[in-house]
Image (cartoon, rainbow, N blue to C red):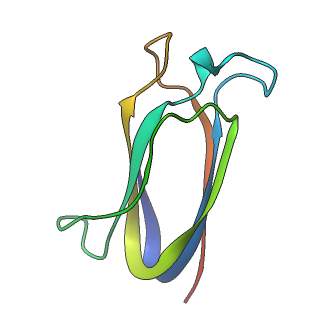
């Protein structure tokens, strides 16, 4: 999933709501994923990596970075082998 924020922001936090309800097993949660950022949409820097996730909500602070584009790369979608992402939020300032 790739997001164009429309302008460059100083991003410092993100949240991902994974598929399924909080009561669902970890089968519906993205297990391993990377979040990357870019100012031009071509050169990407990994700003966070999550491994062995079992939570319905991933809410993490980042080392602040300037970016216009944010990319979520799911490396292991979980036991059901289908990536399920309900929502992604990226927080920062201009």
Residue 33 horizontal/vertical position (percent)? 41, 41
- Seen in the picture, residue 83 relative to 57 is either above or below; the reply is above
The quarter of the image holding the N terminus is top left
Please identify the quarter of the rendering in which residue 53 is found. Answer: top right
Can residue 60 be seen by looking at this rendering? yes
45 relative to 20 in the view: left or right: left
- Seen in the picture, residue 91 relative to 29 is either above or below; the reply is below
- In this view, which residue lies farthest toward the top? 80
- Seen in the picture, residue 83 relative to 74 is either above or below; the reply is above
Please identify the quarter of the rendering in which residue 38 is found. Answer: bottom left
- In this view, which residue lies farthest toward the right? 23
The quarter of the image holding the C terminus is bottom right
Which sits in the foreground, 89 or 50?
Answer: 50
Residue 10 horizontal/vertical position (percent)? 50, 84
Residue 72 horizontal/vertical position (percent)? 41, 48
Can residue 1 be seen by looking at this rendering? no
What residue sits 55% from the left and 26% below the top? 84
63 relative to 92 in the view: left or right: left
- Seen in the picture, residue 48 relative to 34 is either above or below; the reply is below
Please identify the quarter of the rendering in which residue 93 is found. Answer: bottom right
What residue sits 45% from the left and 72% below the top? 6
Residue 35 horizontal/vertical position (percent)? 41, 55
How many labels sit on residues? Answer: 0
What residue sits 47% from the left and 25% below the top? 83
Which sits in the foreground, 23 or 73?
Answer: 23
């Amino acid at each position: 999933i790739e997001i164009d924020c429309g302008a460059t922001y100083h991003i410092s936090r993100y949240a991902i709501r994974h598929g399924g309800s909080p009561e669902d097993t970890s089968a519906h949660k993205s297990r391993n994923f990377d979040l990357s950022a870019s100012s031009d949409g071509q050169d990407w820097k990994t700003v966070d990596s999550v491994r062995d996730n079992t939570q319905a909500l991933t809410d993490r602070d980042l080392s602040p970075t300037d970016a216009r584009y944010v990319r979520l790369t799911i490396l292991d979608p979980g036991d059901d082998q289908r990536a399920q992402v309900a929502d992604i939020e990226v927080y920062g300032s201009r």
